[in-house]
């Protein structure tokens, strides 16, 4: 599978962005799809997951501000990010979760300026 993330950009504190991830094959082929992020000098961290079975989860650090969704018919996964903060600045990566490994797309940069 190939994953193409888009939607990143430069925004000011409090603004919103919607990231999109387009998969080259059906996302139903994977138990889960998700988003991770990596800020400069830090390890990649998990942000949100949407499961094939229907459930979804988001990290406590972004709960109440971020929401993950999916469109199975379009092979798309989205990350709606509201009330953005400077600490949300990072490269955001889409991932397809297999049982024992993940497939990663290229990242999309999100910069939140105060």
Image (cartoon, rainbow, N blue to C red):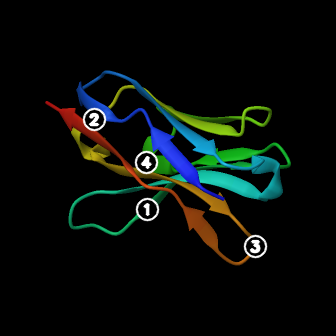
Rate crowding at label 4 as few (under 14), some (14 to 19) or many (20 or more) other CA atoms within 10 Å. few
Position of residue 94 measured from the top left corner of the image (x, y, whole percent): 53, 52
- Do labels 1 and 3 touch, CB within 8 Å? no
- Residue beneath the point at 82% across and 49% down: 28
User: Which residue is more in the foreground, 27 or 16?
Assistant: 27
- Which quadrant: the N terminus? bottom right
Residue at mark 1: 45
Callout 2 secondary element: loop
Is tag 1's residue or tag 3's residue first in the polypeptide sequence? 1
Q: Nearer the viewer, mark 2 or mark 4?
A: 2
- Residue beneath the point at 60% across and 52% down: 34
Callout 3 secondary element: loop
Callout 4 secondary element: helix
Would residue 104 appear left or right of 9 to someone viewing this image? Answer: right
Residue at mark 4: 61
Is tag 1's residue or tag 4's residue first in the polypeptide sequence? 1
- Residue beneath the point at 29% across and 23% down: 14
Residue at mark 2: 85
Residue at mark 3: 99
Position of residue 26 measured from the top left corner of the image (x, y, whole percent): 78, 47
Q: CA distance from mark 1 to mark 3?
A: 19 Å
Would residue 22 appear left or right of 84 to someone viewing this image? Answer: right
Spot the residue most to the left: 114
Position of residue 58 measured from the top left corner of the image (x, y, whole percent): 57, 46
Rate crowding at label 2 as few (under 14), some (14 to 19) or many (20 or more) other CA atoms within 10 Å. some
């Amino acid at each position: 599978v190939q994953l193409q993330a888009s939607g990143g950009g430069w925004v000011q504190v409090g603004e919103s962005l919607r990231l999109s991830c387009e998969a080259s094959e059906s996302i139903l082929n994977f138990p889960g799809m998700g988003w991770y992020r990596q800020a400069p000098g830090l390890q990649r961290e998990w942000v949100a997951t949407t499961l094939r079975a229907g459930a979804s989860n988001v990290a406590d650090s972004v709960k109440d501000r971020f929401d993950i969704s999916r469109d199975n018919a379009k092979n798309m996964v989205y990350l709606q990010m509201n009330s953005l903060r400077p600490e949300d600045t990072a490269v955001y990566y889409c991932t397809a979760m297999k049982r024992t490994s993940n497939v990663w797309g290229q990242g999309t940069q999100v910069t939140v300026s105060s």
